[in-house]
Image (cartoon, coloured by chain):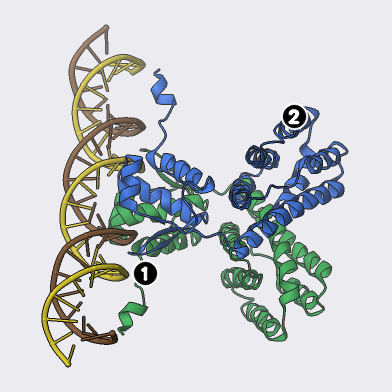
Chain colours: A blue, B green, C yellow, D brown
Amino acid sequence: MELSKLTQPELFKDQAYREIKKAIISFAIEPGAMLSERSLSDSLGISRTPLKLALQQLEVEGWVTSMPRKGIFVKDITETDVREVFELRRANEVLVVELLIPRLDDKTLDRIEQLSKEITNEQHDALKVVQLDSEFHLYLAELSQNRRLHQLIENLTDHFQWFGMAALKAGKSLEEINQEHGSIILALKMRNPAQAKKAVLVHLDNTYRSISKNL
Amino acid sequence: MELSKLTQPELFKDQAYREIKKAIISFAIEPGAMLSERSLSDSLGISRTPLKLALQQLEVEGWVTSMPRKGIFVKDITETDVREVFELRRANEVLVVELLIPRLDDKTLDRIEQLSKEITNEQHDALKVVQLDSEFHLYLAELSQNRRLHQLIENLTDHFQWFGMAALKAGKSLEEINQEHGSIILALKMRNPAQAKKAVLVHLDNTYRSISKNL
DNA sequence: TACAGTTCACTGGTATTCCAGATACCAGTT
DNA sequence: AACTGGTATCTGGAATACCAGTGAACTGTA
């Protein structure tokens, strides 16, 4: 049996999706910028067909808007967007910890704590902290055993990461978030749903305040 | 100024998206069925290019799964799917009423009540009731002033409608939901968030029980 | 009969081509 | 100077052509 039969090569549309999204989040492409299908397909070295599929997904997920026969534009970051994503994250991260706690064992708890410590170590690099914070929340979402919820949280944290980058670019730095992760972990250890929810909300509210203050 | 400049014709990909989704929800295409791009594009009278975009969106939204070079398959309805969608709906419909109540005026309240009454009138037609129930919840979501939440709720209610159809096909009828809508409306009238949340949860839990019992 | 190998029709993935809407520019007119 | 109409050149939308992976059906053999 050949290895090539098992390891499917990544589709062009998926490569393009990842690369473009990365470019948007990292501000390599700026909000409001126009994306020309032809020049994009040239620079990615693929044809327009798989590129269109990537752009379609990015549009459904809220990264770009398509204006037929006019162009495809990276979304602007508006106050409304930040609020909407924040409201959704609030509700759904609470759901994550609700679903999470009954299924929590000591081993995964250790892993959670480890992730949190990695963030503490990187405390001087704001960009890195933002990325690791996303990973932290994404890992919790994984543990919820709800694929759709996981996918939703991924989209929301990616957007938050984007907003956070914008805030960083605006010059100011985000507040520390480590002790907030600490209180989430503490509540998880005690298997206390109410306390865990509250800790998550405090954390998200502070992140929201920090981001919207700096925009 | 020409009229044709104002009224943009609907894109083929959007037409295809709507039609295919409708066919899936109505069980014109059965769960697990394979969708061939070529025969689908033939029967829709369009080429594969816009069809692929429609299928891409349907995949992102969880209606079909694509297996490269093997085929595109309508998702099966599994217990896990029903649970996942239900968990998400619970959390996010609660969010809807939270956001809704502060913005509620008497006029929209009347409209809500009217929608509920329409359902009462159709009580004998289970299929119609399921559809109108979706509209009811979708209208509430609209009032949340959160586009992303609205879009999410639309996807979730559409899935629930699909699951409900499956339950109806399984022979049994859904329980009555009118008095449950009534208690939601009552709580909205009193501008009582806690009571409204509770009423929404009771309603969703009953719907979930009714669906999963009949599958 | 059972099985290994081949063939072939079918799949989606990708590239290419053609088309029409949108827009900026420019020349001619008033 | 301001407007009008034409045109060149962008844009994405859509159709088509071509390719490679897949798997079932067929076939010749042990």
Label number found at residue B53: none
Left of A71 or right of it: where is A127?
right
Neighbourhood count class around disc 2 (C-alpha, 10 Å): few under 14, some 14–19, many 20 upward: few
Q: Where residue A83 sits: x, y (%)?
A: 66, 62
| Residue B121 image position (x, y, % from top left) | 64, 81
Is residue B105 placed above or below B159 in the rendered structure? below
> Residue B92 in the image: x percent, y percent?
69, 59
Does A136 sit left or right of B28 as displayed? right
Residue B10 shows which numbered tag?
1
Q: Residue at x 42, y 48 (%)?
A: A54
Q: Position of residue A100 (x, y in %)?
A: 75, 42
Nearest the camera: B90 or A48? A48
- Above-or-below relation of A84 to A51: below
Residue A114: image tag: 2
Residue in the picture at 31% in, 53% down: B49
**Relative vertical location of residue B176 with respect to residue A39 in this rendering, above or below:** below
Which residue type carries mark 2? Gln
Nearer-the-camera pick, A157 or A105: A157
Marks 2 and 1 sit apart, C-alpha to C-alpha, by 51 Å
Residue B54, quarter of picture? bottom left
Residue C12 picture quarter:
top left
Q: What's the residue type where badge 1 is placed? A: Glu
Left or right side of A174 for A191: right
